[in-house]
Image (spheres, coloured by chain):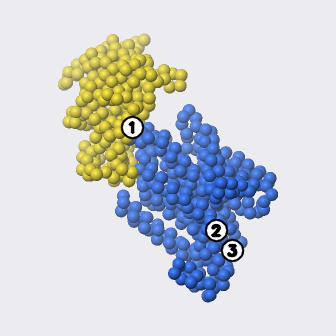
Chain colours: A blue, B yellow
Amino acid sequence: MKLKLFMYGGAALLLLAASIVISLSIGSSGLPINDVWGILVHQLPWMDGGAGQWDAGSIAIVTELRLSRILLAILVGACLSLAGAGFQGVLRNPLADPFTLGVASGCSVGAAFLILFGYQTVVGIWSVPIVAFFTGIIALVIVFALARARGVMNIETLILSGVIVQAFLGAFVTFMVSLSQGVVNEIMFWLLGSLSARGWEHSQVVLPFLIVGLPILLRYAQPLNLFVFGERHAAHMGINVERTKLIVLITSTLLTAAAVSIAGVVGFVGLVVPHMLRLLVGPDYRILIPLSAIGGGIYLLWADTLARMALSPKEISLGVVTALIGAPFFAYLLYRRKVQQGGSS
Amino acid sequence: MIEVQHLEKTIGKTTILKDISFTMEAGRMYGIIGPNGVGKSTLIRLLSGVESPTSGEVRLEGRTADSYGRKELAKWLAVLQQGGLASAGFNVREVIMMGRFPFQNWLGEEKKDVEALIDDALAAMGLLELQHRRIDELSGGERQRVALAKVMVQEPRLLLLDEPTTYLDIGYQVQLLDTVKSWQRERSMTVVAVLHDLNLAAHYCDELLVLNEGCVEAFGPPSMVVVPELIQRVFRARAVVLPHPATGVPQLLLQPGETF
């Protein structure tokens, strides 16, 4: 198990590093690769910052725009992907993800409210993610209440409830946007999910959630493995089922809230990444969870690079890219489930 | 080992079990029998401590079942659930390893070397060739053997079985119960099994507890319990009871027609 984790983990980290290098080297400003790396090298603490060799604009493009955005894409991707893995494990639902469960939309209601009406910093930089977390939890509770029939939650019913809640909350957010005085264009961009016009300070908001969330989910990786045979089986094996569910659901929602409050609703990341990894490394959450964090980072980094390069110099929103990849993937999973059920009955 | 006093369980508005009391001693094998829907599985859930009684109490080794921490209890009480293991992407060996969960740290490691234990369990259940196959590639009977092997490596003092022979061919039914029985004798384990086959129950269990309409109808050795009057009263089936030609254990022959 450990060897497998180190092997796959090492490979994933290498892939991440390579992705960073490539993504950093390309951009809409047409800055030559030599200059990009020259600037970067000169940013090292013991170097001079490169102020004499390059103009301030180029330096800003590399450090303020590209590098910070790459880091943010990795962090947001890691959060969403971990949240997806958590939801899937604890609900034993392969179709669960922050987006399909309506949690992301729930978070966006709280976040949008604060952003649109200018309360972002009522209680410091954490205001948006914290309020987003609470509205996300409320959305989750509503989705569960809708989905539960006689104490049982059917997999498809849960996702259907998620879609209903998501449609309603999405409309609600759009309604708030119409009411606000802000620049509608920019807010619409956030609504669709985007990492443009974000800086280092945004990474600082997301990072602590990841630092707290990842170890908590790792701690519950083995219990999640035992959930695979049902909650009662897990209880017989010595797991405190209610506590495990509560902690994993809260942690996953928290990670979602952090991602949504910075990047808006970026859909299907938590669905696509853990599934790809399952095909690759198997169902063991002790491997799946750390790899989801890294894999989510890689995935979103590429999605964002695509978002800013595809129609360069115009940007398409990140949410559009992930939905274009994720929705067909979701359809495929649904189809495969149908085939499997048809085969077994 | 198990003391049950005035146990009552209501789910919703239905009273499943009402005023059940009995004592089960350590190192013996007990069977719970009774018609469908009489609360046998509910009783197992209460004995395992995952559910709490509406009133009354279940004591395991002197303490009420729900006062134990889940992990603490799982170190010596194992449950084989009805219906066996669901589909999963894990292979047979990984699933059996899960049986060690109560003894592991959060990384899934423990001090004791358990590989030999796993190999023994695999061998005992005839799963050595299947150990690297995925669970969802196995038949229902094979999965049930995996489930039993997983319970074995948990090394319990008390084993609760809820209809362990469902979905098994008659050959595997006997094989499974033989394994449980010899294992019970070797380790002087206590076994409580819900069984629907009265003839098998009579063979393997030291004592039988008969549940009917939420109450204990009878509790005693098979020779006392497996008698035509009781079968007629509880199961509404006419039957003839004969001693087994080889073992002398009372066996039931159903008599068709004139049911009521």
Q: Are marks 3 and 2 on the same chain?
A: yes
Image location (x, y in percent) of residue B23: 31, 22
Specify the quadrant of the image occupied by residue A126: bottom right
- Considering every residue shown, the one lying at the far left of the view is B246
| Residue B82 sits in quarter | top left
Residue on which disc 2 sits? A199
Among numbered discs 3 and 2, the one appearing first in the sequence? 2
Q: In this image, B227 relative to B83: left or right?
A: left
User: What chain is tagged by disc 3?
Assistant: A
- Give percent across and percent down for residue B233: 38, 13
Q: Residue furthest front?
A: A123
Q: Is residue B122 visible?
A: yes
In the displayed structure, A286 sits above or below B161; it is below
Q: Nearer the viewer, mark 3 or mark 2?
A: 2
Label 3, residues with CA under 10 Å away: few <14, some 14-19, many ≥20 = few
Which amino acid type is marked by label 3?
Ser
Q: Nearer the viewer, residue A21 or B196?
A: A21
User: Amino acid type of disc 2?
Assistant: Gly
- Label 1: which secondary element: loop
* Mark seen at residue B69: 1
Q: Secondary structure at mark 2?
A: loop
Q: Which residue occupies 62% across, 87% down?
A: A52
Q: CA distance from mark 1 to mark 3?
A: 59 Å
- Disc 3 marks which residue? A312
Residue located 38% across and 35% down the image: B68
